[in-house]
């Protein structure tokens, strides 16, 4: 049976978990990802400091809480989108593993 080209990676073999999730030798390098995340977070904080100063740290609670609630809702919605994508990839991987062993 011929393989559907979308069911293979560039070297022609079926994808594995490592291919899908970016693992190397079966281990996810979470430390470098954590460093990258913290660099991105720090960069965004510095951008905000440049644009707004330290107002975010000095705001009165009601104003800051309303904004925080909005951001938390946005983040929760983004988490749903990412979770949905991960679930879709996992289901696709299971289908490929069942088909290709």
Image (cartoon, rainbow, N blue to C red):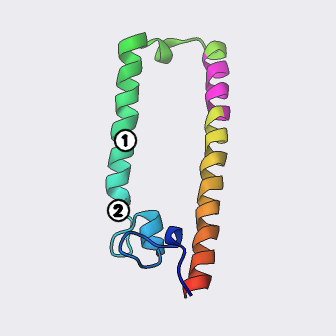
Residue 29's label in the rendered image is 2
Q: In the rendered view, tell whether residue 96 sits above or below residue 86.
A: below
Determine if residue 53 is in view.
no
Give the x, y percent position of residue 101.
55, 88
Give the x, y percent position of residue 81.
64, 46
Q: Which residues are magenta?
A: 64-73
Give the x, y percent position of residue 19.
42, 69
Residue drawn at x 52%, y 67% as measured from the top left:
6
Q: In the rendered view, tell whether residue 89 sits above or below residue 44.
A: below
Q: Is residue 65 magenta?
A: yes
Q: Secondary structure at mark 1?
A: helix
Most frequent secondary structure within the magenta stretch? helix
Please tell me which of labels 2 and 1 falls first in the chain.
2
Location of residue 46 (image quadrant) = top left
Question: For mark 1, what is the residue?
Answer: 38
Residue 81's label in the rendered image is none
Foreground residue among 23 and 55? 23
Which quadrant is the N terminus positioned in? Answer: bottom right
Q: Is residue 2 magenta?
A: no
Q: In the rendered view, tell whether residue 6 sits above or below residue 65.
A: below
């Amino acid at each position: 049976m011929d393989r559907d080209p979308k069911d293979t990676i560039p070297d022609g073999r079926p994808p594995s978990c490592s291919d899908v999730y970016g693992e190397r030798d079966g281990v996810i390098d979470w430390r470098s990802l954590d460093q990258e995340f913290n660099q991105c977070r720090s960069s965004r904080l510095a951008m905000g400091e440049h644009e707004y100063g330290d107002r975010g740290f000095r705001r009165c609670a009601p104003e800051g809480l309303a904004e925080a609630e909005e951001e938390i809702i946005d983040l929760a919605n983004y988490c749903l989108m990412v979770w949905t994508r991960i679930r879709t990839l996992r289901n696709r991987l299971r289908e490929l593993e069942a088909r290709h062993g």
